Image: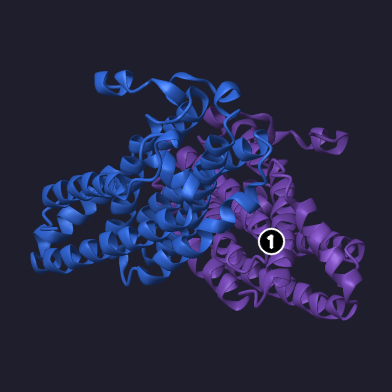
Chain colours: A blue, B purple
Amino acid sequence: MDTPSDASAHTGIAAQDWAEACATPQYRAAVVDLLGALAYGELAAFERLAEDAKLAPTLADKAELAAMASAEFGHFAQLRDRLAEIDADPTESMRPFATALDEFHRQTAPSDWLEGLVKAYVGDSIASDFYREVAARLDSDTRSLVLRVLDDTGHASFAVEKVRAAIEADPRVGGRLALWARRLMGEALSQAQRVVAERDALSNMLVGGVAEGFDLAEVGKMFSRITEAHTKRMAALGLAA
Amino acid sequence: MDTPSDASAHTGIAAQDWAEACATPQYRAAVVDLLGALAYGELAAFERLAEDAKLAPTLADKAELAAMASAEFGHFAQLRDRLAEIDADPTESMRPFATALDEFHRQTAPSDWLEGLVKAYVGDSIASDFYREVAARLDSDTRSLVLRVLDDTGHASFAVEKVRAAIEADPRVGGRLALWARRLMGEALSQAQRVVAERDALSNMLVGGVAEGFDLAEVGKMFSRITEAHTKRMAALGLAA
């Protein structure tokens, strides 16, 4: 849903559709990067959630995590199909982002069910924030794909409910999970910064349009907004972030 | 699709819909068992395929296995929803089959990508054969669910193609995979026999109707038919089974 401030941002590329916008080679490259990064992110999320499903204490919980994993796969499939549609090789487009995302997941393998839930919730939320930040800068066709993929899978409330109940039952759990959430955010930011530093076209688009040049301060501001939203969510969950 | 011989079998329960058939308590129990077993089987298959996706040599292969896993999850969700619809607790209905299926997967964890593909293909095929065997004995509503879930996900050909190519490239691979396929079938049969021995209502239905009593010879024949079909498939794949 566009807020009034988003609507006013629909100038330049954002006022164009893909057919028009893709005539700018740097914009085209940025979108291929973006879709590649999102696609690999969804595929990696699928793998991690499926892996975490093994930690589920009950069959119903396992099914819930498997459902989240399947939803991520559905998103992946949409992004991959779109890459093919715009004549980009999906595998090649994803490859530049594999190292950073694999490293993120390697560094943040949950050691139990609750850590897995917090990670799923945090990951989903950060991804949503990022999708929203970026959507306003995209041509109308790519924007509607990104917003469709962002479509809430309705599982965040599942994670929130389980984590809250666990903290109520044993408040010490809250301290441990707060540390965990902080580590997740730290790793996510450090990997994101790595990607931003390496992918010029993508970074340029993220900071407000291909014509305006790279502005690290602007990227920093975006990261700050995402971090702030994260902190508020963690507080609402009973975790001091 | 009903073959003429199937159609002639649509007498008794198979000529009834669920509303009529479920009035027989033993039939109802058998269907709850069947749907519970299938549902857990799909959920376990989801987990294993997602796990095997990690072994994929390329991103495209990984995506293909993730797609198979997601399709299994979709089947699981249909079976779970049906259990809830007929007032059976999905988790309780799946529980009796968890040990046998977990044990099967524990005993047959693939050690590489090709073993994973052969397992996915063999598992899918045996499951399809079993679904078909059982479908003819079900009331029309349950039958149409089982046939819908059986709906070919179209991924078998992916596995077949990759395995064939690997054997062509190195014929010794064929010998190793043939042994592997034999082990898979052996484990599947031994776990299936365990389930049959423990679940009377389900076994009675499988051997041809609740009224006729348990006939181990009939179960044995069903297993023989499934084993034969497996042997033919393996031969077609270039594996002497």
Task: Report the front residue among B214 and A182.
Answer: A182
Residue at the spot 52% in from the left edge and 60% down from the top edge: A98
From the viewer's perspective, tell me whether residue B175 is left or right of residue A128. Answer: right
Residue at the spot 55% in from the left edge and 29% down from the top edge: B20
- The residue pinned by badge 1 equals B120
Q: Quadrant of the C terminus of chain B?
A: bottom right
From the viewer's perspective, tell me whether residue B125 is left or right of residue A206. Answer: right
Task: Report the front residue among B219 and B188.
Answer: B188
Where's residue B218, x and y in %? Answer: 76, 59
Residue at the spot 52% in from the left edge and 25% down from the top edge: A141
Image: B95 above or below A131 = below
Task: Report the front residue among B55 and B90.
Answer: B55
Q: Chain of mark 1?
A: B
In which image quadrant can residue B135 be found? Answer: top right
Residue B206 seen in render: yes
In which image quadrant can residue A54 be found? Answer: bottom left
Q: Quadrant of the N terminus of chain B?
A: top right
Q: Which SS class for mark 1? A: helix
Residue B25 seen in render: no
From the viewer's perspective, tell me whether residue A21 is left or right of residue B177. Answer: left
Q: How many marks?
A: 1
Badge 1: residue crowd in 10 Å (few <14, some 14–19, many ≥20): many
Task: Report the front residue among A38 and A54.
Answer: A38
Where's residue A189, x and y in %? Answer: 31, 58
Image: B102 above or below A26 = below
Q: Amino acid at mark 1?
A: Ala
From the viewer's perspective, tell me whether residue B54 is left or right of residue A210. Answer: right
Where's residue A190, x and y in %? Answer: 33, 63
Residue at the spot 16% in from the left edge and 53% down from the top edge: A164
